[in-house]
Image: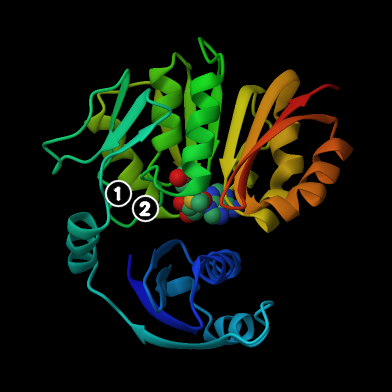
Amino acid sequence: MKYIEVTMKAQPCNETITDVLAALTADIGFESFVPSEEGMQAYIPKALFDEEALKNVLTDFPIPNVCLSYTLTEPEDKDWNEEWEKNFFQPIVIDNRCVIHSTFHTDYPKAEYDIVINPQMAFGTGHHETTSSILAELLDADLKNKSVLDMGCGTSILAILASMRGANPVTAIDIDDWCVNNSRDNIALNHINNIHVELGDASLLKGRKPFDVIIANINRNILLADMPAYTACMHPGSELYMSGFYIEDIPAIQEKAESLGMEFVHYREKKRWVAVKFIKRI
Ligand SMILES: C[S@@+](CC[C@H](N)C(=O)[O-])C[C@H]1O[C@@H](n2cnc3c(N)ncnc32)[C@H](O)[C@@H]1O
């Protein structure tokens, strides 16, 4: 898949501004973000790129007195992958229990769960706050023999940890064929054989048997739109973990979830990004 690289400059520039910029551009389809001192580079599949939507995000930027500009390039897939792997992906340890590294890392800490990810263009190395918060939730959850669905699986990092923690069977779904292929590679790299990967969205869930646990790290608007499809394949007691939105989005997410018979359990916050846990009651 061809990606567009957009270099955005903000004046002034700080972490809050790049976080808000990442959240707003994620809502219009951007998938990967690399902050810099002057702003950030963001990546979007060429097929999804809508320059007018980008201009609107920059024009309507909610933080006052920020001057924003952008330039576009179309990087070669291979160059981008090599660049990203060399410069941006360092091994990461979650809660002292789970290490995530790539095949090109030789020196990384040992941990109870050792996950190998070659992310290429897919989202999900454990570095983003949303991924690490859900990984931490999965480390705390009882997943033994539970059926798990990972919606918006990206690299399938969450599905892989769920499987390592005893979940069975595991289904991983992503709307992006690059992520589906990358998931299959990562699942094989980790010698896992109970994750079934599918290309598509929430419409694939119609008529499915209930899952014991559903994980969805996507974004606020997609979660609000797709939550009815998720809860339609849950039973009383099923757990739903969601991330990809900010702390101020919790009331909207909670209201929707409760209208679908879900009970709020708790949330985790990292740099204003949150992961929430719900249990289906009816
Ligand atoms: C924020 S990434 C999360 C990746 C990974 N699960 C993680 O936690 O790091 C969101 C993923 O959702 C996928 N996605 C976007 N819209 C979707 C939809 N409607 N249904 C399923 N997947 C979707 C994107 O392609 C992307 O891989």
Numbered disc 1: secondary structure: loop
Q: Tell me the tag on residue 99.
A: none
Residue hosting label 1: 119
Going by the numbered disc 2, the residue's amino acid type is Ala
Q: Position of residue 88 (x, y in %)?
A: 27, 57
Asked which quadrant contains residue 209, the reply is top right
Say which residue appears at 57% left-offset and 50% top-offset.
218
Say which residue appears at 75% left-offset and 33% top-offset.
232
Neighbourhood count class around disc 2 (C-alpha, 10 Å): few under 14, some 14–19, many 20 upward: many
Q: Depth check: give the residue in front, 224 or 263.
A: 263
Say which residue appears at 51% left-offset and 69% top-offset.
18
Image quarter hosting the N terminus:
bottom left
Residue 262 in sight here: yes
* Vertical placement of residue 235 versus 172, above or below: above
Q: Is mark 2 within 8 Å of ligand 1?
A: yes
Say which residue appears at 26% left-offset and 28% top-offset.
190
Q: Position of residue 191 (x, y in %)?
A: 25, 23
Q: Position of residue 187 (x, y in %)?
A: 31, 32
Q: Are marks 2 and 1 in contact (CB under 8 Å)?
A: yes
Judged from this view, the residue extending furthest toward the right is: 259
Residue hosting label 2: 122
Going by the numbered disc 1, the residue's amino acid type is Pro
* Vertical placement of residue 232 versus 181, above or below: above
Residue 152 in sight here: no
| In this rendering, position of residue 97 left or right of residue 225 | left
Image quarter hosting the C terminus:
top right
* Vertical placement of residue 210 versus 222, above or below: above
